[in-house]
Image (cartoon, rainbow, N blue to C red):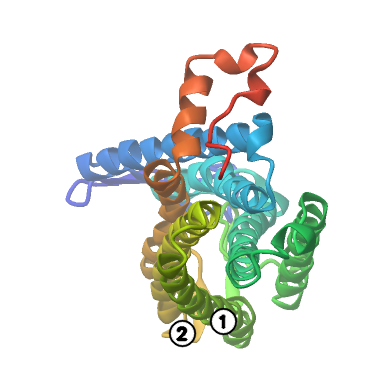
């Protein structure tokens, strides 16, 4: 029951040799696939490590317990899910076409993928709203946006994402085990109806991204006018420091948002080119991996633009966070 195609370096076997309806599997053993496996595995480890640094930093150091940083924490949790669960599963599917964990696990893995992606998007929406209030109404920001309110908003956002995903897969006939379409035993293939691709495009791309882009257009316009005002009122030093800090934070988070959108646009453009989307198509695989790698890029942006991330990383790597008073270490100037 084995056949080897030496020209393509692909060994064809069966996922479950004891079943007559077993799928044929492709074990990719060529040098190119081995190199791809090593590279993607390193990306997965890198993603987990960097996002854990972000999560530990914001969770441990009290100075970082701010509403804006809670949004970065939410985004890091979504990125951690990608590196910890999504990437390893997708890497194994690239190397071995068989699915050995059953239909329920297949659906669960797709739900985790969708939850991490939608969780990231909602975090970006909240980031845009947070930056809009911080820049346009700086004097009211501390009263309108609190850690408690932000925590509730994040929980509600993730809950809405989970509810939407359950509805999405239910109406695609994938939540009931008997309704998962399989041609053979040992595959994990999710088909998405074209009508739901359109719904998803509107609800989870066009609408939220339009809101984000409009808010950031307003934010940068307000920031430009504030910068002019600060140059005029040069004697108000504290206001100048505060305005500079807010503007820098806004620009940094703006870079994160626009990198995210750049990764999503090819994904949706490709999804609109087909009437039926399958998770094993090559185009789908390439564009989804662009999305996954975005989870590795976000912490790198923090490392480049955020001094607190670099400082907290030093404390974490040197194990100084285990000191009794480490949570009160000063990572930032008092004016931040």
Is 329 in front, or is 42?
329
Image quarter where the N terminus lies is top left
| In this rendering, position of residue 149 left or right of residue 221 | right
Is 74 in front, or is 252?
252
Q: Is 311 above or below relative to 118?
A: above
Decide which of tag 1 and tag 2 comes sooner along the chain.
1
Q: Is 190 above or below relative to 296?
A: below
Q: Is 329 above or below relative to 1?
A: above
- Are the residues at dot 1 and dot 2 in contact (C-beta closer than 8 Å)? yes
Secondary structure state at the residue bearing disc 1: helix
| In this rendering, position of residue 326 left or right of residue 6 | right
Task: Kindly identify which residue carries mark 2.
Answer: 272
The residue most toward the left is 7
Is residue 58 among the parts visible in the rendering?
yes
In the figure, residue 273 lies in which quadrant? bottom left
Q: Few, some or many C-alpha atoms within 10 Å of disc 1 (few <14, some 14-19, many ≥20)?
A: some
Q: How far across and how far down the image is residue 251, in percent? A: 44, 61
Q: How far across and how far down the image is residue 94, in percent? A: 40, 49
The residue most toward the front is 235
Secondary structure state at the residue bearing disc 2: loop
Q: How far across and how far down the image is residue 105, in percent? A: 68, 49
Residue pictured at 40% horizontal, 44% vertical: 300
Disc 1 versus disc 2: distance between alpha carbons? Answer: 9 Å
Residue pictured at 49% horizontal, 37% vertical: 309
| In this rendering, position of residue 116 left or right of residue 27 | right
Which mark's residue is nearer the viewer, 1 or 2?
A: 1
Image quarter where the C terminus lies is top right
Task: Kindly identify which residue carries mark 1.
Answer: 201
In the figure, residue 117 lies in which quadrant? bottom right
Q: How far across and how far down the image is residue 260, in percent? A: 45, 64
């Amino acid at each position: 029951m084995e056949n080897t195609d030496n020209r393509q370096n692909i060994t064809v076997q069966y996922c479950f040799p004891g079943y007559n309806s077993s799928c044929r599997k492709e074990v990719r053993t060529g040098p190119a696939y081995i190199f791809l496996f090593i590279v993607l595995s390193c990306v997965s480890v890198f993603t987990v490590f960097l996002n854990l640094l972000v999560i530990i930093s914001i969770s441990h150091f009290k100075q970082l317990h701010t509403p804006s940083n809670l949004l970065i924490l939410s985004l890091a949790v979504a990125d951690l899910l990608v590196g910890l669960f999504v990437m390893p599963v997708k890497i194994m599917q690239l190397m071995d076409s068989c699915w050995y964990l059953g239909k329920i696990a297949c659906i669960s893995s797709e739900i985790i993928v969708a939850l991490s992606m939608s969780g990231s998007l909602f975090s970006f929406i909240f980031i845009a709203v947070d930056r809009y209030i911080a820049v346009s109404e700086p004097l009211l920001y501390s009263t309108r946006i609190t850690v408690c309110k932000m925590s509730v908003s994040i929980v509600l956002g993730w809950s809405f994402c989970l509810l939407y995903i359950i509805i999405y897969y239910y109406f695609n006939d994938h939540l009931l085990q008997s309704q998962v379409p399989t041609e053979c035993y040992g595959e994990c293939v999710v088909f998405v109806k074209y009508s739901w691709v359109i719904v998803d495009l509107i609800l989870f791309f066009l609408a939220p991204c339009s809101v984000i882009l409009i808010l950031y257009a307003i934010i940068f316009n307000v920031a430009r006018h504030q910068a002019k005002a600060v140059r005029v009122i040069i004697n108000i030093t504290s206001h100048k420091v505060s305005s500079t800090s807010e503007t820098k934070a806004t620009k940094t988070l703006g870079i994160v948002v626009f990198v995210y959108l750049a990764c999503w646009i090819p994904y949706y453009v490709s999804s609109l080119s087909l009437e039926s989307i399958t998770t094993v198509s090559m185009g789908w695989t390439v564009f989804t991996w662009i999305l996954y790698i975005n989870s590795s890029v976000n912490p790198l942006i923090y490392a480049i633009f955020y001094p607190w991330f670099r400082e907290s990383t030093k404390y974490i790597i040197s194990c100084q966070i285990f000191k009794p008073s480490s949570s009160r270490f000063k990572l930032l100037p008092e004016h931040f």
